[in-house]
Every structure is written in C-alpha cells, then in structure tokens.
Image (tube, rainbow, N blue to C red):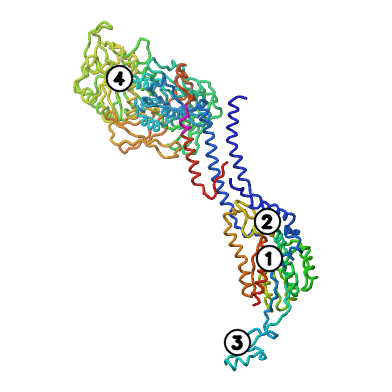
Amino acid sequence: MPPSPATPKSPGAATRAGDLRGGKAGPFPIDWGSLAPLRLKARAVADGVYAGMHRSVRKGAGVEFGGQRPYVPGDDLRFFDRRSLLRHDRLMVREFETETDRALWLCVDATASMAYRSADAPGSKLAYAALVSAALARVTLSTGDPIGLGWVGGHGTHGIPAMAGREAFERVVGALEGAAAAGDVSADAAAIERTLGPIARRARRGSVIVLLSDLLDLPEGALSAFTALATSGRTLIAVQVLDPVEAELGFTGNVRLRAVEGDTVVEADADAVRAVYKERLLALSTPWEKELEARGGRLIRATSADAPVGVVRAILKAVHEARR
Amino acid sequence: MSFLTLGGLLIALLVVAPIAAHLLRRKQAEEQLFPPARLVPPTQPSARKRSMLEDRALFSVRALAVLGLAILGATPFVRCSRLALARNHGASVALAIVLDDSLSMRAKLPGGKSRFERALAGARELAQGLATGDAVAIVLAGAPPRVALGSTTNLAAVTAALDAAEPSDRATDLEGAVQLARGLVHGLVQTDKRVVLLSDLADGAPDAPPIQGDADVALWVPLPELEAHDQDCAVTRAERSGSKVWARVVCSGREPAAPATSASASATPAAKAPVEAARSIEIRAGNKVIGATQLGRSARVEEVAVALPDGAPALLRAVLTGSDAIAEDDEAPVISAGGALPIAVVVDATATRVATGGAPPIEQALTALQLDAQVHPLPSVPEHEAELNAYSALIVDDAPGFTPEVRRELAAWVERGGVVLLTLGPRAAAAPLGAGFEPLIAGVVRWTPIAAAPTGAAGSLGVDPASAPTLGSSAPGLANLDPRGRTALDPVAIEGADVLAKWKDGAPFLLRRSLGRGAVLSLTLPLSTDESDLALRPAFLSLLESFVSTARARGGARRIDVGQAWTFDGYKDVKVRRMPSGGVGAPRIIPVIEQDRRLRADAPLSGLYELTLDGEATTRVAAVPDREIDFRPRQVRDAAHAAAMGGVAPALDASPYVAIALLALLAAELALRARAPREAPIETT
C-alpha cells in the first residue's frame, strides 16, 4: 500500500510546521533543535574553519609590492615605474598591498518563514542562520576585524554596530539568541531599506556584507537594494538558507500546503510537480546569483541540514575570491 | 433472525465496505505549512479527478460483482415479471395470439401505458419465451378480425408482425377473432394448442355466453389487468341538418338503449348511468367554438342538437369537452344530413304482405337490422335522374320490366355508383312489349313454376349452402326453400357476373353484376310470400345486410363504421387520406389495395377521410360503432385464467445470465486495471 497522499516524507515536519500556526506571521521563538547552545556550537564551527589572515584587496599606497599593471590616464604619477619605461619602453605603474580593517556586516532574515523546520533539519532555518552568523563573527573577530549585525523582520531583534573584541562576539550571540522569527515583509518594500540603510551608512570601503536569508518572501526591490551596497569596494555575499524539505519538496502524493507568509494555499500532487517546483525555486535565486556575481559578490546555497563548517568555509572562500 | 436476514446483512456489508474504503481514501489531504507554497504549481484537480474516476469505476464494478454473486446465490428466489407460458413437460406449443386493437384498448392503465401497449408488450414477452418448434399465429381482434400472421415457426416474422401492429378505432369482435385464431392452430402437430387472448374483453356483449376454449385448443387470458373498468364518452356521429348539428354521444356503463332526442339544451336521457357531470358538446370551426350544448348528467346514449349561427362554415367538428378514459373518441367530424344510407324500395304491398299486417317484410327487415339506412317506399321506379340521385340503393321487387326511359336513367344511375337489387318473379317474366331489364340484366327472364314436393324430401328445391358464403351461417336455412317457382336467366345474363348463391341444381339464385361504379344484384325469386317464404327466413336478413354493405362500399354512404372498407369499382386512380383531427398534423395515407379485381380501402380510424377518385375529391367519415363504447367485459371461463398455462411471474432460472454478467464485470475490472497508470497503482479497497 503506498503512503497516504497527505503524509510527508518526514512526519516531524507536520508537527513542527504546526507550531507555526499559533499566529499569523509570528512571533515564533527560534527552534534551535540540535544547534543549541549557540555559543559552543559557534566556537566549534569556527575552530573547524581555517582562519588564516586574509589580505586586503585594496591596492595602492602601501609597504608591500603588489605587482605592476599597464598605465592608464589618471593614475597617480607617484607610482609610475620609470625603470620599466626605460628597460622595456612600456608605461607601467607599480602597485602595493596595504592591510586595512575589513568589517563584516551580518544581515539576518528573521521573517516568519525562517522559523520553518522540517524533521530532516537539525533546527529551524533561523537557528541555522544564527549559527553560521555566530561562527563567522568569531572567525572575523579572531582576525581583529569588527563585526556588525542587522535584521530583516523579526521580533525582539536589535542591530549591533560594527565593533571588535571579545565583547563584540558576546553581544552578537546575545542578539541572535534573543531574536524570534516574525513578520511578513513580502509586501513591505521599506523593510529591506530599514535594514540595509544603516549598514550602507556605516560600512566603509572594504567591508563585507553577508545576507543570510531564504530569499523566499523578500519584497520587490530587495535584490536591487542589496546590490546597491556593492559600491565603495564593499563585498556582498548572500547565503540562501533553505530547509531540506523546501529544497527538494520532500512530500509524496497529494498535499495541501499553506504559505507561512501570505494567504497562498496550494493542493498538489507532490511527485508530479517536484520538477517544476525546483525549477521555480532555482529561478527565484538565479537573479541573485547573477546580480551578485556581476558586482563581484557571490550567492551561496545551503540547507539547514548541511554542515555549518562547510558553509562558513564557502563564505570565507567567496570573500577571498571576491577580493582577489 | 433468519438465515435470509443474516445473508442480507452480509451482502449489505459487502456493498457498504467498498464505499467506506472509497470515502476514507478520498479524504482531503491534511493542510501543512510550507513557506515556498507559492512556488508549488496546483496540480491537484487533474490528479484527484483521474484517481476519482479510476476509483469509481473500479468500485462500481466490484459492487456490481458482489450483487451479481448474491443474485447468483439466490437464483431459486429470483422471479421475473415477464409474461411467460408454462409448458406441459417442456413440449412445444402452438400459440394463436389474439391481440385486441379496438378502440377500447386505447384506455390508459394506472401506470400510464395504454391497454394496447400492455397487450403488445405481453405478446412480445410471449414471443421472447418461444423456443424452436413452437408455432405462432397472430390475430387482430378489431372488427372485422384479421390475420396478422399465419401459423409459423419463424420467430423473426412474429417480431415483425408485432412491430407492425398498431391501435385502431375499430369495434371488438372477440367471438370472431377467437374462432379465427382457433382455426389457425387447429390441425398443427403440436399437442399443446392455445389461443392467447390479450384483450380488455369489452366487445359490447357482456351478457353473451362466456368465451371458452375447446378440447383441442385451450383458451388463455393471461392479463386480467387489461379488463376495462373505465368511464368514457364518445361522439359517435355528428350530422348537420339545416341550421342545427345533431350529435350522438354514447357513454360507457349500461347497455345502449334506444336514443332519445333532445333539442338544444333540453336533452332527455334515455338511460341512467354514471357519467362525468358538466360535459358539453361544442361545435368548432377550426379552433373557434360556434355552438355548444350541455349534456345530460347521467345519459348513456344521447342525441343533442346544437344550433349553428348563420354563415357557419362547411367544415365543422363536434367536440366533447372534459376528459375521460379515451381522448381519441371525443371528437367527430360533422357531415351533412343524410349520413344514413337512403334506400328506395319499390314493393307491391299487396303481394308481399304478411299475416300479422304492417309494412312489407323487406321494410320491416331493413328497420330491424338497424343498418343505419333510411328506407323510402316508392310506388314506382323514379324516371328522372334527380329523383334517383337522392338514393344510394334501390330495391325493386318483381317489376314487370322497365320502359326504355327508365332503363336508361336507371343504368346511368348505377354507373354513377348506385346499387340496385332486382327480384325477379312471374311479373318480371311477363313484361309487356317494349319493357325489359337491359342493360341491367341481359337476355330474357323466364318464370318457371315448380311442382310442389313434400317438405324435407330429397327432391325439394333449395339453395346450396356451400355456394352461398355471402349469406353466412344462415345459408343452410335456404336449403329447403321449396318455392312455387323460380326465374331462369339466359346464359348471357350470367356472363361477367358473380354468382353469389346457387340453387341446388346449379342455376343462379343470386347474381351480382358490376355496371360502371355501381352494381346490380339479381335474385331469381320474388319477395312475394305467395311464391315463397324467402322474405321471412333469417337468410334474407343476411342477404339484405350484404346488399346494404355493398351499397355503402360502392360509395353510396358518406359514413361507415370504422373497420369497414370502401370499394371503388370503375375507378382507376384512387387515393385515400385520413385527415388529422382538428387540422393539426399531417394526413395519413391509407393504402388502397386490389382485391378480387376491385380497389378497396379500409378505414382503421374514426374521423374524416378525403378520397380522390380519378381526380375528383370527396370526403367520407368513419364513425365509432356504439357498441364499442361499452366497457363491460365479456365473461370468460375460469379455466382461461389457470395458472398452469403460465403467468406474469413464473420462477425463472437466471443463473446463465448472471454468470455471463459476472464474467463481463471481471473483464471490465481487468480492463480498468490495465488502463491504470503504473506509477500510480490503484489502491485496493
């Protein structure tokens, strides 16, 4: 006898999803699952990540030679390589690398949809994003760079200005632990502006801005608002965090699905529509990927079932590649 | 709790269980939260619909299979509500099905079907139950009785004959139909011979002896529900006379009595019987009512007069208002007065007197026969065309020839359709010089006296009954006629004539010779009681009836009874159409057939007929006989209802049919399973 049409692959998914029915769009306390306690888990993740020194991508006045490049009109003549002109009869300028403070700004999506957790996931999407954020904060702080925190939606959330030192990690972890998923910003175009506005004002050249979101219910213009931060030498990294069931449409047979944000109710044969769903899901994130890569950034796709260490490494690698 | 109750509960459980499983499976999916729900295309309707269809089909097949198994197991209890005959040790039978197609069979049964439809359905059910070796004949009981199908073992012919049967407005002749049916199966090899009577038994003779079978052919009346108990009124005739229309209304119930006439609304009932109150006769021109008269509240037979306004159109209808058992007989076309056949009689009252006094025997006989004829005694044969045209038939008794002027006018009248009966006696043989019967009778007429012989002696002169089928069952009564003389005709007079009856020595007794559109009947014996007692014998009534019938058939009468036929001698192109009642609908073409070198057409329905005779159009009317509006059933012997002959609910072995149905269901389920998609196998319920 085949499974009942209304039975998801993971029985726990219905149970945990049922927890979200308490109110319309939250607030929903973070379902930490096996990701708690955040501090210890974040330290463990950070310890597993190679935390070597990273170099600034800024080239110009400095102490360490960074190579040569062809001269273009407007270059500072102080760095003109006259030896190359005399020896090779070519106009070249010399470049030098310089070490700067590269603040990391974390922008965490805490809307209601981030509270979703299926049985296959160790915790909710927000818990997973918080763990990755905390681990990144620890890695960043260990290199002496400041860390800042901002929120999209959420309940009981408060942003943290860029700061460095041991205290900064505690404040970031405290802010992450005290948040709850809430709100539907899909129709609130100003919500993303309220989040990114302060970051745009405070993040200086060379800063790295990491957005952790499921990208499912962000308002129209969220992508353009985020990519607008790419000016002034800032690096943009977006991490799409999905639940494994969301990534694969982990149901079988006939299912009746209700969106957490919005009033969408869909009844479908999961097996029949899985391919179309995955195409649509990919189509949703593809513009982010293209826009970010066009501005030197990266989109990283992850599920809450993935190892956080790998995700953090991927983020650091993306930062490193973006700065090269 | 009996075994049957337990079995019934078990079967019900087997039927309900798949339903419950089906409903459980069809329960709506539980709703779940899923943030990217808007990315999921809604494909539920098609998927569920397909699944639903598959499930329903399978469920239906299985439920039917369970019921089929239950029926198969309960076969001894299965009875079929189909008319079937019981066979005597399974032997073949010879059936003569008498199907009543008379007017009274149009009455409705409680279920809404007419009696004729039920009788026809019964005949079909009987035909379906026939087996190889059975012989079937079909007789229609509407007057006159007709053979729809002679005895045959071809069952396809039986079906075709039943398909061709249709109701009519005829009277009922059960006696004749049963007799005819009995003759059809008599002598067949089957030992079990039956006449199956499918009729309401309303033949207008409720007090006649009961109908019964005989030792050779049994009578079976299998559908007692057909017996008529309805109330019905009919307009049997309507005649226009001056500024009035006389309508005759007959209602079912009591025995028809002598009609009472009433003028305008002052109808006097002739007999009392329950009839629906507040009915009236309306005279309509098209759909416009131009006159009406209230009927008596309890009249059985009533003739009412309805005054017509000035300038009333020629085409009128008499319509009975209200409703009753048969709607088809509530309307009759109005014809001009003279609907009764006008017969002129030229008889010497002194020669044909009777000891009891009164009118000559022929006039008394015509009146007693009630043949709807108007008898006009004349002192002599009319000499002018206008006088002759007032009559349709003429009887001339022993006339001493006709003058040339009279002969010429008489011959012309006959050629136009008149019918004349000439009785020839001593005075006819003693025609004066210049007088004669040419061209009505060719040759010379001679009177031959006969010596008296002892009554009943072998040498007595009489009519050969075998040569006189026209006179029916009373023909043997003329075998010992023993007249004092008879008329001899020249051989030339017999040429081209039909000899309807012969003397025992072969000489013609009654001749019929067609002349133009009319006919001349010659009787070689006068009506005088001095020469013979022919006019006092029953066979004389049959002779007169045949004469009147011939006169009507020759077109003398504008109205005939339904079931009678018109004959058209001398016409080459004849078309007959029955006009629709009320002018609504298309005319019905009545087939004209040639029989004995004569064209004839039956009138199966009452109403107005349009005849086109060699391009000349005329109208005729067929009327419902009064006796048909008498629904009291004829008595039938109890043996005709014996259950041993069969019935409508015999126990039938339905096992083969149920088994075949189960096999079909199994095949259907296999087909459904084969069609089901492999990726979504059908869940067993």
Q: Which mark is residue A70?
A: 3
Residue located beneath label 1 in the image: A309
Among numbered discs 1 and 2, the one appearing first in the sequence = 2
- Is residue A118 at least partly visible in the picture? yes
List x then y, in percent, for residue A219: 68, 66
Residue type for callout 3: Pro
* Residue B489 located left or right of residue A41: left
Q: Nearer the viewer, residue B244 or B95?
A: B95
Please provide the residue range marked out in magenta.
Answer: B653-659
Question: Which secondary structure, mark 2?
Answer: loop
Q: Are the numbered discs 3 and 4 placed on the same chain, yes or no?
A: no
Among numbered discs 3 and 2, the one appearing first in the sequence = 3
List x then y, in percent, for residue B221: 45, 21
Quadrant hosting residue A141: bottom right
Marks 4 and 1 sit apart, C-alpha to C-alpha, by 125 Å
Question: Which secondary structure, mark 3?
Answer: strand
* Residue B475 located left or right of residue A289: left
